[in-house]
Amino acid sequence: MNSNRQSLWKRIMGVRGMGAALTAFVGLVIIYIAFGLINPTVFSGQNILNLLRSMSKYLLIGIAQSYVLITGNIDLSIGTQVGMSAMISATLMTSGISPAVAILVALISCLAVGVINGYLVGKFKLPPFIATLGTMFVTRGIAYMVNGNRNTDAISTGVGKEVADQFQNFFYYGSTLGVYNTFWIAMVVFVIFFFFLSKTRSGRHIYAIGSNIDAAKLSGVNVVMTTTKAYLVSSVCSCIVGLILCAQAGMGNMEAGNMYEMYGVAAGVIGGVSPLGGTGILLGTLAGAAVWQTLENGLNMIGAQVGIQRLVIGIIVVTAVLLDVVVRNGEFGKKKKKQS
């Protein structure tokens, strides 16, 4: 019996990135309990529900960035795609277009950006920082232009209060089984892309090009297509977050999604997704998003200034990346050998 348990534990820990994910979950528990002891309101049911809803946006953005990071690239256009999605959908709805059509147009627009990013990086070999920096400016420009360089009116002015309420309740204010719909949307997306990354050939290819792109090519991996798939996942998640922000505000804001690309990096890296590529699992991203939101929520609850919040989270991100670099360079192993 004990040997079976040990074998199961070895298999679990043998999954790449599992150790970092479990460490993040342990850290999450410690952080949550610590804030709860300082301010018991942290343990309240309503605060937990609000925390889950807020965490969902970070989880979706984390999934978006994690897919790209695992390929060894980065997507700086995530936040601006969020803004573009929010503005396109809101502008169409204020013009009387149904939410279904508005959502479809926003999704197609974001997918087009994902394809462009994938081909610029995968086929034309542009450095991902430069390629996605370019599309970042383009998509933010579209977010500004789509409604004439101003935020939209309330979406209810176009589609009516009843339809607007349905849209807002579906993406943000409504709940199912006592939990906000935003959380369920994020979890459905998480399950789908977790399966895609861990159980499909395309997922294995994403890890392959992040680990060693030359070896992946020799193994027959279509680098262009695989890179594009990763950026498409990023675009889908960004579009959904844009719809959530539109539902939350009840209108389109040109600055929606500002800095979200960095939030995605933080969620992934805290959960063990390596910015150097080839390592990490979405379970870690889930833990990272939860840690990020718990820190933000807890620091708010104890009255910490915004500057302190950013300082703490920044230190955690840098520490996580530093540990990843140390482990990859084998520094721990070298020290052990010297000691023996």
Image (cartoon, grey):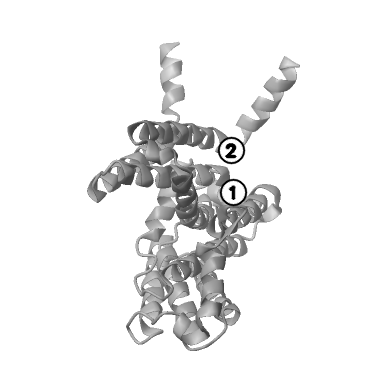
Where residue 258 appears, as percent x and y from the top left, is: 35, 64
- Please give the count of numbered marks on the rendered protein: 2
Position of residue 156 relative to residue 120, above or below, is below
Where residue 223 appears, as percent x and y from the top left, is: 59, 60
User: Judging from the image, what secondary structure is the residue with disc 2 in?
Assistant: loop
In the rendered structure, the answer to whether residue 163 lies left or right of residue 316 reads: right
* Image quadrant occupied by the C terminus: top left
Q: Which residue is mark 2?
A: 16
In the rendered structure, the answer to whether residue 261 lies left or right of residue 18 reads: left
Q: Residue furthest top?
A: 340
Amino acid tagged 1: Tyr
Where residue 191 appears, as percent x and y from the top left, is: 64, 52
Residue density around tag 2, few if under 14, some if 14–19, many if 20 or more, within 10 Å? some
Q: Quadrant of residue 86?
A: bottom left
Q: Which mark is residue 207?
A: 1
Regarding residue 55, the answer to whether it shows in the image is yes
Between residue 227 and residue 27, name the one nearer to us. 27
- Asked whether disc 1 touches disc 2, contact meaning CB atoms under 8 Å apart, the reply is yes
* Image quadrant occupied by the N terminus: top right
Where residue 23 appears, as percent x and y from the top left, is: 49, 32
Position of residue 227 relative to residue 112, above or below, is above
Between residue 72 and residue 297, name the one nearer to us. 297
Q: Earlier in the sequence, mark 1 or mark 2?
A: 2
In the rendered structure, the answer to whether residue 157 lies left or right of residue 200 reads: left
Amino acid tagged 2: Arg
Identify the residue shown where x is 36% and y is 47%. Answer: 296
Residue density around tag 1, few if under 14, some if 14–19, many if 20 or more, within 10 Å? many
**Is label 1 or label 2 in front?**
2
Between residue 141 and residue 157, name the one nearer to us. 157
As measured in the structure, the alpha-carbon distance from the residue carrying label 1 to the one carrying label 2 is: 10 Å
User: Judging from the image, what secondary structure is the residue with disc 1 in?
Assistant: helix
